[in-house]
Image (cartoon, rainbow, N blue to C red):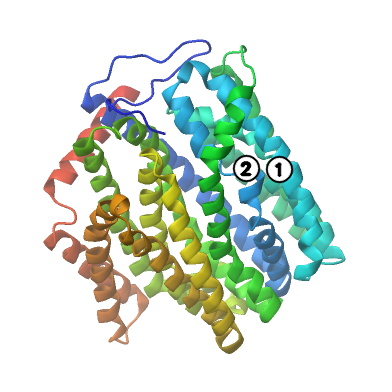
Amino acid sequence: MQVSGTAEATQPMSSGVSAQTSAPHPQGLRTRVFRNVAVLLGGRAATLVVSAAASVVLARYLGAELLGQFGAVYAYLSLFTWLATFGIEPLLTREAARQREQASSILLTGMAICAVSSLGTTLVALAFAPYFGYRGQLLALLFLAAFDLYLLSPVRMCGIIFQVDLRQWYGTGINLFRQILWLGIVGLLAFLHAPLLYVVLFRSVSAAVEAALIWRMSRQFLPPSRAILSGQVKSYISQSFPVALSCIAGTVYTRIDQVMLHSLASATSLGHYVAAVKISELFEALPVAILFSLFPVLSKAAGENALFRQYLDRAFRYLSVAICGVCVAITVAAGPLVAVLYGRQYSASAGLLSVLIWSEVAVFFGSVLTNALLARDLQKFLLVPTILGALVNVLLNVFLIPRYGATGAAWATLVSYSLAWMVGLLAFRSTRSTVLQGLRTALPAAAMALLGVGLVSLTNVSVLIELPVALGVYALGVWSSKLIHRDDLIYIWEALRGALSRSN
């Protein structure tokens, strides 16, 4: 993910063609990145709509208890996803961006490593499942779900070439097709009143279709001459080891709350929690779309400190302002939103959503920070926020869940995410300046957002009035504090105009 000394994006490649060496004009780079981001956002927006529709149908069809069981299955398996891929994807992306002519062999080597680790992960996860209370039908569900989360991972890995070549619309389109297929399946299963077993089975079927399409589409950008780089296997594993460790800690603090709710509370409580999580996590497509396109560019600009910080500044500001605006809207409208989507049976999810959505500020912040560290070969520091977040989350959940149930889990998530990504790395000189650069944007944006929510909470009027007032207060605060200013609007407009002119 990093090449020092140049700021050009990885050039689009056809089969067998090596990377171009000439750097594009900065405006052309901005246009290309913006076009990729626009396509990704458009595709992901469509995907979000379809995915949200599937989640709503699934929640209404299963009910809180079965939805809790469904969430418990995938939450448990998510604890081991780090082992299935061993955190090697960012490393492969970085190396393929640096050595485009060897991308086929680089990806094949990664897929071979992943094939071995994913099979071992499946065996380990199933072996430990009974100790976490997964027996009988739940164990069968774990086996079916493992096919999706683990065993298909090596095949999906070849889609890394879409990111390297800034052709992310392929991955976005394939994912959209999968979500449409999944929505159709969920609708049919709901109509037939099929048991939960079939829900998990056909989710894995839709994942297999997605993996097959990724495999087929990626081959046209990868030359047929490829071989496993046996001499690089040890190096790839050792370099990805810190990422893998950070992934395990990360999955602990992002999913352990659901596993613990299932064990310490009830499936029904978990069902309400999962319903809220599904809404809050929908917005994570935004940083993924932007940073997916920006990452190869960051990797190549890592050696030019001023340019690198310029890219980071825009990423931190734009994403912080965006997610804090989302927090205002969701907090104010949580009750009506949950009622419309899930019905009255999920009314308890509204309060959980009002807390969980604020954890996305740290998620967005951490997404930028993670890409910055990976681009500068500082991935070893990723262990700090993930381990810190995992420890804090587990400890808080142990204390809060028995006393406050799902509400305690929501606050544990908010506190642990914030401490992990916005505080933990301040202790290190190598990462302190990057964290401070992000905090200069994130903290004022969050303050403006809280001000907007706080003011309307003092009123007792319709949400149709509260929502625009809260957003108006927030927008005024953002503009007056110069988090977004005139130059940003000009920058976005010129990039949009360039993208549109190239598409005509």
Return the residue found at the far right.
Answer: 136
Residue lying at 23% horizontally and 47% vertically, measured from the top left = 313
Answer with left or right where residue 200 lies relative to residue 82.
right
Answer with left or right where residue 131 lies relative to residue 57.
right
Note whether residue 168 is visible: no
Residue 372 in the image: state x and y as whole percent: 35, 44
- Classed neighbour count for the residue bearing mark 2: other residues with Cα under 10 Å, few (<14), some (14–19), many (≥20): many
Which type of secondary structure does the marked residue at label 1 adopt? helix
In the depicted structure, whether residue 415 falls above or below residue 172: below
Mark 2–mark 1 distance (CA, rounded to whole Å): 7 Å
In the depicted structure, whether residue 50 falls above or below residue 498: below
Nearer to us in this view, 316 or 434: 434
Q: Quadrant of residue 248?
A: bottom right
Residue annotated with mark 1: 118
In the depicted structure, whether residue 173 falls above or below residue 96: below
User: Could you say which disc has been placed on residue 85 in the image?
Assistant: 2
